[in-house]
Image (spheres, rainbow, N blue to C red):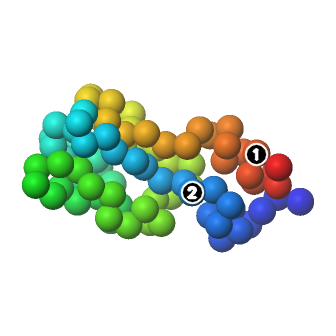
Amino acid sequence: MPLSGDELRKKVDWGPTVDPELCTGCGVCVDFCHQGVWELVDDKAVVVVKSNCVLGCSHCATLCEAEAIAFPTIEDLRRARRGE
């Protein structure tokens, strides 16, 4: 039986991580995400509320030209949803 959203959130640590060495502080992630996941601190993107990230969303990583943002794989999310 597939897991509910809350159960899935407990099983998969879904959300972005940012490599501060690669981050240019452009702010595209902050501007794009309306969930309050990001803030700019000292000219670098910082994840402030990871749990606000929508399960399965990784658009900020796609938009990041510096490739500083990483997520768990969608396959990890699918396996967890199936209860594996």
Identify the residue shown where x is 50% and y is 48%: 57
The N terminus: image quadrant: bottom right
Camera sees residue 18: yes
Identify the residue shown where x is 38% and y is 67%: 49
Instruction: Please give the residue where the numbered disc 2 appears in the rendered image.
Output: 13
Camera sees residue 5: no
Helix, strand or loop for disc 1: helix
Residue farthest bottom in this picture: 6
User: Is 67 placed above or below 69 here?
Assistant: above
Q: Identity of the amino acid at label 2?
A: Asp
Name the side, left or right, on which 68 lies relative to 24: right
Helix, strand or loop for disc 2: loop
User: Is 2 placed above or below 62 here?
Assistant: below
Label 1: how many Cα within 10 Å (few below 14, some 14–19, many 20+): few
Q: Position of residue 5 (x, y in %)?
A: 67, 65
Of residues 6 and 72, the one drawn nearer to the viewer in this rendering: 72
Instruction: Please give the residue where the numbered disc 1 appears in the rendered image.
Output: 79
Q: Position of residue 17 (x, y in %)?
A: 40, 48
Q: Identity of the amino acid at label 1?
A: Arg
User: Is 62 placed above or below 55 here?
Assistant: above
Label 2: how many Cα within 10 Å (few below 14, some 14–19, many 20+): some
Residue 36 marker: none
Residue farthest left in this picture: 42
Of residues 1 and 15, the one drawn nearer to the viewer in this rendering: 15
Name the side, left or right, on which 22 lies relative to 43: right
Q: Position of residue 42 (x, y in %)?
A: 10, 55
Identify the residue shown where x is 67% and y is 43%: 76
Name the side, left or right, on which 79 lies relative to 35: right
